[in-house]
Amino acid sequence: MNRKESMIDPASLGCAGYQRFRSRRHWMAQSATALSAASSSAWSPLVQRLAAESPHPNRSAPATNMILLWMQGGPSQMETFDPHPEGDGGEQVGTIETEIPNIAISSWLPESAKQLGLGTLVRSMVSKEGDHERATYNMRTGWRPDPTVVHPSIGSLVCHLLGSTTTIPAHVSILPGEWPSRGGALGAALDAFQIGDPRNPLPNLRAPTGDARQQRRLAALSDLLEPQFEEGRLADLDRVRTQHRSSMERAQEMMRSDQLEAFELAKEPEEIVQQFGDQPFGRGCLAAVRLIEAGVRCVEVELSGWDSHINNMDLQKGQCQVLDRALAATLHELERRGLLNHTLLVCSGEFGRTPQLNPAGGRDHWPVGFSSFVAGAGIAARNAIGATSAKPRMEPEKRMENVDRPVTVEDLHATLLTCFGIDAKEDWKTPVGRPLAWSQGRVVEAMLDRSRF
């Protein structure tokens, strides 16, 4: 089998998630995920201790922080970053020139077009995963799902290796969906700290009583638990004792932290707030900029609703209107505040949509030639990689012929890790002692500005 044939697994294509049988095993897996997410807010402060004990990469690398703008559901490349006016439905979209030479994007993204010159547009992303859950795992971790190990998301991995300098969580997920980023084999302490619309205050950060009474409660709790450990009745749980105490101390430290102001959008001038758009995703992007400014290592903001099996044009246009203002404002503010030099920004979904419209006026799943945009620390500016055909061959064995200069999901991850000074091929060991590389991809040198390294 040649390389083009091996890139795509036809069995993985289609909306299998809609038909998946909710077996007992699947229900248990979902329950475990929910428990992990529920506990992550309590354990996330431990990220600092765990990361401090971990190896640190070469800090001559440009990137220290990351923002992931996650388009859950699979945005259509035809209606966003890779329009083809001569393609099926292309006449409804139109194009607009960008600051990248000879590159036009959808006319539904006019504000983003002005900012695209800050980074690299990859139009030739390829994946073997065509199911939402599997493809989301693949794009978040750089690995295909494996029953023997849960790979850490890239945000968790970066927090593990670079550590934290904040008293608030180092890894934050805003508006998370069904499959939030996880620490996986690196531990639940590296799961993303999840919050909703930043317009709403964070829950449980203020004691329901006065400070004096709160201190008496904490002292009473310590008196209640400590003798049991000291007398040895729970000596075999000494590790739990340490985690419990550390968790409480860090939670209290976070509750007192001035860095919590990063979540308060009211601190921003109204004109800045309006630039991002008065909706949850825009507010999430503004909060992401503020969190990066406060020193948070990795922030994700999710915009769900891109799954357009029917009525593709109206759905994608509505999503583009939300994305356009928020993406453009995020890039502008990162640059204006001097944060883009050390912050990677990635905008992508798990896959793209079929170039041909289906009978319902929709586009189906298409992991062969979708688009991702990357900007910031170590990434080449005014740059584009790859191209796709306007009228591609649809046969599974012919699909790779439609993609020029393909970039795999694994290659993208290896390139991002390089910007952080992380050797993608370096081995680490899972909890069971299994050696594993941080990434199995190859660095895409054409994406990098090597003068920054």
Image (cartoon, helix red, strand yellow):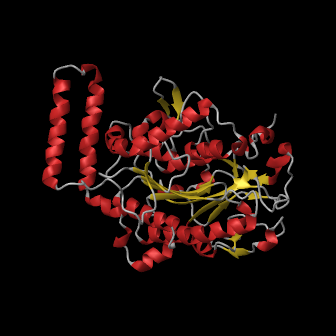
Left of 385 or right of it: where is 401? right
Occupied quadrant, residue 337: bottom left
Q: Nearer the viewer, residue 126 or 211?
A: 211
Residue 178 place in picture, x, y as percent:
56, 48
Residue 325, horizontal then vertical, whole percent: 55, 72
x and y percent of residue 238 in the render?
26, 25
Please state, as top left, top right, bottom left or bottom right, where the N terminus lies in the image.
top right
In depth, the one of 256 and 377 nearer the eye is 256
- In the image, residue 434 sits, relative to residue 134, either above or below, namely above
Q: Residue at x 44, y 35 (%)?
A: 186
Q: Residue furthest bottom?
A: 271
Identify the residue shown where x is 20% and y is 54%: 209
The image position of residue 19, as x and y in percent, is 72, 42
Q: Is residue 103 visible?
A: no
Instruction: Report which quarter residue 442 is drawn in.
Output: top right
Q: Nearer the viewer, residue 34 or 402?
A: 34
**Can the viewer see residue 431 in this picture?**
yes
Left or right: residue 338 compared with residue 136: left
Count of number-bearing discs: 0
Residue drawn 17% across the image and 33% down it: 224
Q: Is residue 51 above or below residue 268?
A: above
State the residue at coordinates (58%, 35%). Answer: 27
